[in-house]
Image: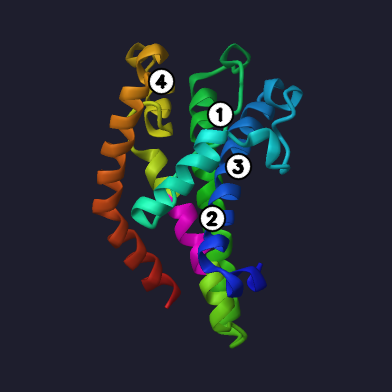
């Protein structure tokens, strides 16, 4: 991965974005699996193989266009299927909804631990530091973005799991026009807070 970073930092970032999104979705599926719902497992979605997770529009076209127009990366993978009727409690449903966010946070924390350990032992070079920082910031960004309580993002899914009366019809939330507006609003909110997130990460690492 470090050789890939040396050749093309932007391509390295793209690869990390894709796999971080995939791990986010696997987190949802695994959270359901440990609670007795095997829908994602039977669908072959609890795998690190990226092919079953890739959504052509969300995983390839949108990230590429986002990079061309804004020099950033944004996208999504195919949602991991699960049957909420197999989840016994509302807390369990909220756990499934939050599992992707928790996965991204866990990845960021592990990479931060690696960064700090290597730095404390004076074996952290610039290339490794850059690679770890990219992984950390991408996963923190994904966690923050998905926490925004706008459907269909996970933040709203968590709220709806805990408060079923707040259910919003998926026919509305997956309307293409609504999706564009939701992404724009979430992107504006993220842009407002991203500098503070990155400064906070730098304070911890440096």
Give the distance between the C-alpha atoms of the residues marked 2 and 4, in whole angstroms.
25 Å
> Which residue is drawn at the image coordinates 60% and 38% (left, top)?
27
Residue 39 location, x and y as percent?
A: 69, 20
How far apart marks 3 and 2 lie (CA) works out to 12 Å
Q: Which residue is mark 3?
A: 22
Near-viewer residue (90 or 101):
101
* Residue under label 2: 14
- In the image, is residue 136 above or below residue 95? below
The first of marks 2 and 1 along the sequence is: 2
Kindly state the secondary structure of the residue where label 1 is placed.
loop
Q: Is the residue marked by circle 3 packed among few (<14), some (14-19), or many (20+) residues within 10 Å?
A: many
At x 54% / y 42%, what residue is drawn? 60
Element at label 3: helix
Residue 138 belongs to the span the image colors magenta: yes
Give whichever of discs 3 and 1 has the lower sequence position: 3
First reached walking from the N terminus: tag 4 or tag 3: 3
Please tell me whether mark 4 sits on a helix, a strand or a loop. Answer: loop
Q: CA distance from mark 2 to mark 1?
A: 19 Å
| Residue at 55 percent of width and 61 percent of height | 11
Instruction: Give the CA separation, mark 3 to mark 1.
Output: 9 Å
Provide the residue span drawn in magenta.
133-141
Identify whether 80 is placed above or below 202. above
- Considering every residue shown, the one lying at the far bottom of the view is 122
The answer to whether residue 114 is left or right of residue 101 is right
Q: Which residue is mark 4?
A: 174
Residue 163, position as x, y percentages in the image: 37, 18
Mark 2 vs mark 1, foreground winner is 2
Majority SS type along the magenta span: helix
The residue singled out by tag 1 in the image is 79
Location of the N terminus by quadrant is: bottom right
């Amino acid at each position: 991965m470090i050789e890939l970073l040396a050749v093309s930092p932007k391509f390295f970032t793209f690869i990390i974005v894709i796999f971080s999104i995939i791990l986010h979705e696997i987190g949802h599926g695994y959270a359901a699996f440990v609670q007795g719902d095997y829908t994602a497992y039977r669908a072959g979605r609890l795998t690190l193989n990226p092919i079953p997770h890739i959504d052509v529009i969300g995983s390839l076209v949108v990230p590429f266009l986002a990079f061309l127009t804004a020099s950033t990366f944004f996208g999504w993978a195919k949602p991991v299927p699960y049957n909420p009727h197999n989840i016994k409690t509302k807390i369990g449903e909220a756990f499934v909804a939050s599992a992707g966010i928790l996965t991204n946070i866990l990845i960021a924390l592990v990479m931060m631990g690696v960064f700090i350990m290597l730095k404390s032992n004076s074996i952290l070079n610039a290339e490794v530091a850059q690679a770890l920082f990219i992984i950390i910031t991408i996963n923190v960004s994904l966690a923050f973005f998905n926490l925004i309580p706008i459907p269909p993002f996970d933040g709203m899914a968590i709220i709806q799991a805990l408060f079923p009366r707040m259910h919003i019809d998926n026919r509305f939330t997956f309307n293409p026009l609504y999706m564009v507006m939701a992404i724009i609003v979430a992107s504006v909110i993220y842009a407002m807070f991203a500098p503070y997130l990155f400064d906070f990460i730098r304070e911890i690492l440096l």
